[in-house]
Image (spheres, grey):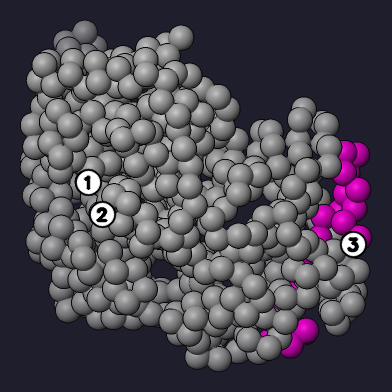
């Protein structure tokens, strides 16, 4: 196709198209979800809009659009192929109980034809085929046909392909849009669900018209929503006729930096270094986005910080394969900071912090490698002792010089020791490694990780918005007020995670809280609860919220109008989460743990009891 779209053009085109059709442009939310224990990262544009998809009124209205920063790690082991990325941008638009299928199909078609310049023989669409619980989505198919899409380019696929749902709550059929690459059909039944490469998905319209109340029971939804997502990078690949995402911006510049550092040439068609080039480029970009986010986190051994650490360390391992000396990840990060700074100012604002954290993690990893070498020696000593013992009891015993796959995987998983180094060091002393056993252990680990990741993603819209969650959310406001009063007025929220059992609150602080500080904060929160202060919500402009003294730490994520929750004179915050009506509903507040989250960030876990 080779239409030469740039990321900037595609972003601007998308936002203007939907703004012209009555949508309010809202900023990208943070990559780190707020008050959502079901996901480690924001994986789609709908995640920050969960309360509004469930019926809460959005300050900007019923029609919204944006470009959302996203992180997905479920396919992280696929990174290195032509299209998978860890960090990506999602073009999105939403109807919150406003328009539905007729308008959305019409606009999707218009965007494909007039904006992207496609012809009807260059794309195909899919619709829900129907099952025993929900009928075939003939309405959407007929709407596509009325727009001019031939019947033979409209495919009906089962629930596994064309249905969006969670365990409970809003759900419904979706209609996916695919580019037809022009490749021949793999079989007479070839359709967009095949993995032959003929069809590449570029967008998806989800119609939330049902509410799932039981495993097989679906009832009409009170509020029908539309959720659309178009992957920006995926669109750039197919629209520009590229072989892979890694020859599109900003990867072209990143590859030049890696070439310079490695003294090797990048070959997009594939050679022994192609995958390493791509992994380094992708993982450093994702790490840059996570650290540089307005709620950016640091590498750690738990949660999202652990995922970040593994991304960085995997990038370092592939730098080793490319013979890149340590200490250069920051140079690559600067490429991404410069590219994204105009659309996401936080990249430029946090550039020095990003480079510093990458450098520190690289130093930590080098120490880890040294620790892994010691563990490697222990494995060899153990094998030698086993051989010595077996030889004494059996003169015909054959000396075992193979490191088991389980041991090799333990060195990798527990100590971060690359299997390539294990193989290399073993070879130097006449040993080998059971690579097949290692791959089996690694595969088992992947399956467990994918299961956990799938469970987290599925929970996205199922986050409990009930009374207990609302009470805990309100408690975080009081907790912040207490910390600012008794610890430091400069304390800000760095992250929050709420389940139905407890709240977790991260905040900037340079010291471990004393017992006295913890008691003062607890007593202060319980004092406000006892006073049964009303929790008042007002909608206003962001400027008015600032003038009234409302705290809005992550200002870049807000639109022109915001919700401000006030709790008497104690607290005033810009927020979109669920809240109690009065503080007296909260019950007794208790801090159960205070600990370090990462460098310069402390974490409090607390609960409330009736």
- Of labels 2 and 1, earlier in sequence is 2
Residue at image x 37%, y 54%?
545
Task: Give the x, y percent position of residue 165.
Answer: 69, 43
Residue at image x 88%, y 75%?
145
Please, what secondary structure does the residue beneath circle 1 have? loop
Q: Is residue 133 magenta?
A: yes
Q: Which residue is mark 1?
A: 298
User: In the rendered view, does 514 fall on the left or right side of 502?
Assistant: left
Which of these two is toward me, 56 or 145?
56
User: In the rendered view, does 527 fall on the left or right side of 512?
Assistant: right
Residue at image x 15%, y 49%?
361
Task: Give the x, y percent position of residue 431.
Answer: 20, 38
Do the CB atoms of the residues marked 2 and 1 lie less than 8 Å apart? yes
Q: Is residue 299 magenta?
A: no
What stretch of residues is rendered in magenta?
118-138
Can you say whether 515 is above or below 297 in the image?
above
Q: Quadrant of residue 397?
A: top left
Task: Give the x, y percent position of residue 214.
Answer: 77, 27
Which of these two is toward me, 105 or 406?
105
Q: Which residue is mark 3?
A: 139
């Amino acid at each position: 196709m080779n239409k030469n779209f740039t990321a900037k053009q595609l972003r601007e085109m998308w936002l203007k198209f939907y703004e012209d059709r009555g949508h309010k442009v809202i900023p990208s939310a943070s990559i780190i979800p707020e008050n959502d224990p079901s996901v480690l990262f924001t994986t789609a544009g709908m995640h920050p809009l969960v309360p509004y998809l469930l019926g809460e009124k959005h300050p900007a209205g019923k029609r919204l659009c944006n470009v959302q920063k996203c992180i997905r790690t479920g396919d992280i082991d696929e990174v290195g192929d032509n299209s998978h990325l860890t960090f990506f941008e999602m073009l999105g638009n939403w109807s919150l109980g406003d328009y539905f299928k007729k308008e959305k199909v019409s606009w999707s078609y218009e965007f494909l034809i007039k904006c992207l310049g496609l012809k009807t023989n260059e794309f195909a669409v899919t619709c829900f085929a129907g099952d025993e619980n929900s009928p075939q989505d003939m309405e959407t198919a007929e709407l596509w046909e009325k727009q001019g899409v031939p019947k033979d380019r409209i495919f009906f696929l089962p629930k596994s392909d064309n249905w969006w749902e969670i365990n409970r709550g809003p759900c419904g059929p979706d209609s996916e849009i695919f580019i037809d690459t022009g490749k021949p059909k793999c079989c007479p039944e070839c359709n967009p669900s095949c993995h032959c490469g003929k069809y590449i998905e570029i967008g998806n319209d989800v119609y939330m018209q049902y509410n799932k109340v039981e495993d097989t029971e679906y009832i009409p939804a009170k509020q029908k929503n539309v959720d659309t997502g178009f992957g920006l990078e995926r669109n750039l690949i197919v629209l520009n006729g590229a072989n892979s995402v890694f020859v599109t911006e900003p990867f072209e510049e990143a590859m030049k930096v890696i070439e310079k550092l490695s003294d090797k040439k990048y070959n997009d068609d594939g050679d022994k270094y192609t995958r390493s080039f791509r992994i380094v480029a992708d993982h450093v970009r994702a790490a840059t986005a996570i650290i540089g986010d307005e709620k950016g986190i640091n590498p750690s051994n738990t949660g999202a910080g652990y995922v970040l650490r593994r991304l960085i360390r995997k990038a370092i391992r592939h730098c080793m394969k490319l013979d890149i000396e340590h200490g250069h990840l920051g140079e690559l990060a600067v490429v991404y900071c410069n590219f994204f700074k105009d659309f996401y100012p936080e990249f430029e604002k946090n550039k020095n912090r990003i480079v510093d954290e990458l450098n520190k993690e690289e130093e930590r990893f080098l120490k880890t490698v040294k620790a892994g070498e010691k563990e490697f020696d222990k494995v060899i000593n153990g094998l030698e002792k086993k051989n010595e013992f077996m030889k004494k009891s059996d003169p015909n015993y054959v000396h075992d010089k193979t490191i088991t796959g389980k041991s090799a995987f333990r060195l990798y998983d527990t100590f971060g020791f690359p299997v390539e180094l294990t193989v290399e060091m073993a070879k130097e002393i006449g040993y080998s490694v059971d690579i097949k056993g290692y791959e089996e252990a690694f595969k088992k680990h992947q399956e467990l990780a994918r299961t956990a990741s799938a469970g987290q993603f599925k929970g996205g819209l199922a986050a409990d918005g009930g009374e207990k969650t609302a009470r805990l959310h309100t408690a975080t406001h009081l907790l912040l007020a207490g910390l600012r009063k008794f610890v430091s007025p400069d304390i800000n929220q760095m992250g929050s995670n709420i389940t139905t059992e407890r709240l977790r609150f991260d905040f900037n602080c340079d010291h471990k809280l004393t017992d006295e500080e913890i008691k003062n904060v607890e007593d202060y929160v319980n004092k406000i609860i006892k006073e049964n202060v009303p929790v008042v919500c007002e909608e206003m402009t962001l400027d008015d919220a600032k003038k009234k003294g409302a705290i809005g730490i992550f200002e870049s994520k807000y639109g022109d109008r915001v919700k401000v929750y006030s709790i008497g004179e104690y607290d005033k915050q810009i927020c979109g989460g669920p809240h109690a009506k009065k503080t007296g509903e909260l019950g007794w507040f208790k801090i159960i743990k205070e600990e370090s989250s990462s460098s310069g960030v402390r974490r409090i876990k607390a609960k409330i009891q009736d």
